[in-house]
Amino acid sequence: MAKDSPKADFSHIYNRRDPRQFFKELQSLDYQVPHHALPFLQAAVEWLSRDGDEKPPKVLDICCSYGVNAALLRYEISFAALVDHSSSASRQPAAEEQIASDVRYFSSLPKRYDISIAGLDVAQNAVQYAVGTGLLTAGYTENLEIEEMSPELQQELKEVRLLTCTGGVGYVGVDTFSRIMKAISNPKRVWVVAFVLRIFSYDEISILLSESGLVTEKIPDAVFCQRRFASSEEQQRAMATVRAKGLDPTGLEADGWYYAECFISRPDDEVQRYPLKEVIRIV
């Protein structure tokens, strides 16, 4: 997380062996951005599957955490149902039991997409959970903000077509995206779907992506609830940050919520041929 971020510190729930505490604490704040992101991720997957490939596009979920986006893409489950599942147990089994239970639970669900999803996050336990339960095809715990990636991750990224990041900007920035783009065999054909809190700028990342021939468009006239503020102090810090960016928090952060915007980056030729509203039908 950026040193000057106004966000509350939830690091104590980001790297546990299973996500029960993660969902419990964020549910109390009405955390919901994965729900809002899913239709956009689906639209991207379906559009990228139109080019005749037998398989859906390979995905890298940046700041994947416990594999929430992967669960929603891989299985026919809503975010609300995922949260309910994690918080509905009448007892508190050990992490090993919970993981085994989650493996059975996810394997019982119908598939949404039979898709390869790799995850990147510095939280080792969270990534191990997501891989162990089959949500992620592969997971990597490398900090690309400060170090070059491993040969294994380089190999993993070669055929990636879709990058997703639904809350990671602010934790990661242009250095991470730069290293990822350099590892992809054909970065000019990649799509990026990112949900970015209004307290953070996406400009540097957009400029970086443009160097690979990608055009970044913001979903017009739309903001998306992320979660409620954890305290009045967090709200005041967020409002001050938003105002410093020249934005108005009235009706948004001033009402007690973090809000995100959705940015979609596509190859320039596709942007010219296919307006965003034709590609993302929910716009």
Image: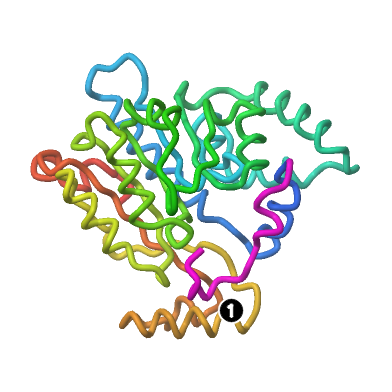
Q: How many marks?
A: 1
Asked whether, in this view, residue 76 is left or right of residue 239, the answer is right
Specify the segment rendered in magenta. 1-17
Which picture quadrant has residue 246? bottom left
Query: Is residue 19 covered in magenta?
Result: no
Residue 274 rendering spot, x and y as whole percentages = 14, 41
Residue 112 rendering spot, x and y as whole percentages = 49, 27
Query: Quick check: 175 above or below 92?
Result: below
Q: Main secondary structure of the magenta part?
A: loop
The furthest residue to the right? 91
Residue drawn at x 65%, y 59% as measured from the top left: 11
Query: Quick check: 75 above or below 257?
Result: above
> Could you classify mark 1 by the number of other residues whose Cα lies within 10 Å: few (under 14), some (14-19), or many (20 or more)?
some
Residue 219 visible (yes or no):
no
Query: Is residue 15 covered in magenta?
Result: yes
Query: Quick check: 236 above or below 69?
Result: below
Residue in the foreground of this view, choosing between 176 and 226: 176
Residue drawn at x 30%, y 48% as measured from the top left: 178
Asked whether, in this view, residue 109 is left or right of residue 6, the answer is right
Residue drawn at x 28%, y 44% as measured from the top left: 280
Q: Type of residue at label 1?
A: Glu
Residue drawn at x 56%, y 56% as measured from the top left: 32
- Helix, strand or loop status at disc 1: helix
Residue in the foreground of this view, choosing between 202 and 239: 202
Residue 76 rendering spot, x and y as whole percentages = 55, 31
Residue 86 rendering spot, x and y as whole percentages = 73, 43
Residue 122 visible (yes or no):
yes
Residue in the foreground of this view, choosing between 30 and 14: 14
Q: Which residue is mark 1?
A: 234
Asked whether, in this view, residue 106 is left or right of residue 225, the answer is right
Residue in the foreground of this view, choosing between 260 and 178: 178
> What coloring was used for the rendering?
rainbow
